[in-house]
Amino acid sequence: MAKARRPRASDLTSHIGFWMRRVSNQVSHSFARKLESSGVTVAEWVVLREMHRTQETTSPGAIAEITGLSRGAISKLMSRLIDKNLVHRQEGRADRRYQEIRLTEKARNLVPKLARLADENDDLFFSPLSQAERQQLKETLMKLVEIHQLKTMPIE
């Protein structure tokens, strides 16, 4: 009796996604290890960085909109950031259900230091590429984000 032929399967390494994930995992894990000494997770860093960029009081809902995370996930992140004295939360004056959040002085001083760690981490991984190659890679990835309308920020 003849054996049934197995359908051909593409090699794992033939997929662009495999190579992107391989690099992305290493870049992300390296950055997470660098953040450990600051007591901040990658998810917390993303929220702090976005709040620092806007330089204003905002709401958990606005942060959820910017990051693409659920309100539940943002609520948990906010609680952790409040416990770490990095974010201050205040109930709205007119509507107690509304919350205003803002960075503490500690966070405003910490974010630039963590941004330098992010810069160093990128430099470590991408320095073998020329500036033109780095720019092309970034533009290609940004094009894919736009085409596929990717809204969620990477937090892990």
Image: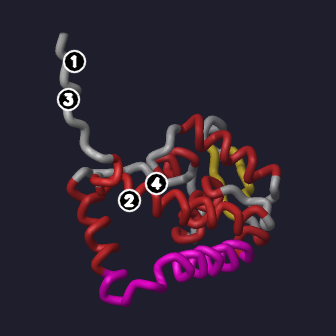
As helix, strand or loop, the secondary structure at mark 4 comes to loop
Q: Are marks 2 and 4 in contact (CB under 8 Å)?
A: no
| Residue 41, quarter of picture | bottom right
Nearest to N terminus: mark 4 or mark 1: 1
As helix, strand or loop, the secondary structure at mark 3 comes to loop
Q: Which residue is mark 2?
A: 19
Colouring method of the image: secondary structure
Residue visible at 59% across and 69% down in the picture: 52
Q: Which residue is mark 3?
A: 7
Q: Are marks 1 and 3 in contact (CB under 8 Å)?
A: no
Relative horizontal placement of residue 138, taking residue 22 as reference (left or right): left
Nearest to N terminus: mark 4 or mark 3: 3
Mark-to-mark CA distance, 4 and 1: 48 Å
- The residue segment tinted magenta is 109-135
Q: Which residue is mark 4?
A: 153
Point out the frontmost of discs 2 and 1.
1
Residue visible at 63% across and 57% down in the picture: 42
Relative horizontal placement of residue 54, taking residue 40 as reference (left or right): left
Q: Residues within 10 Å of mark 3 (few under 14, many from 20)?
A: few
Nearest to N terminus: mark 2 or mark 3: 3
Amino acid type at circle 4 is: Met
Q: Which residue is mark 1?
A: 3
Mark-to-mark CA distance, 2 and 1: 34 Å
As helix, strand or loop, the secondary structure at mark 2 comes to helix
Q: Position of residue 147 (x, y in %)?
A: 21, 56
Q: Nearer the viewer, residue 146 or 94?
A: 146
Q: Position of residue 134 (x, y in %)?
A: 36, 81
Point out the frontmost of discs 2 and 3.
3
Point out the frontmost of discs 4 and 1.
1
Point out the frontmost of discs 2 and 4.
2
Residue visible at 67% across and 40% down in the picture: 76
Q: Nearer the viewer, residue 150 or 8?
A: 8
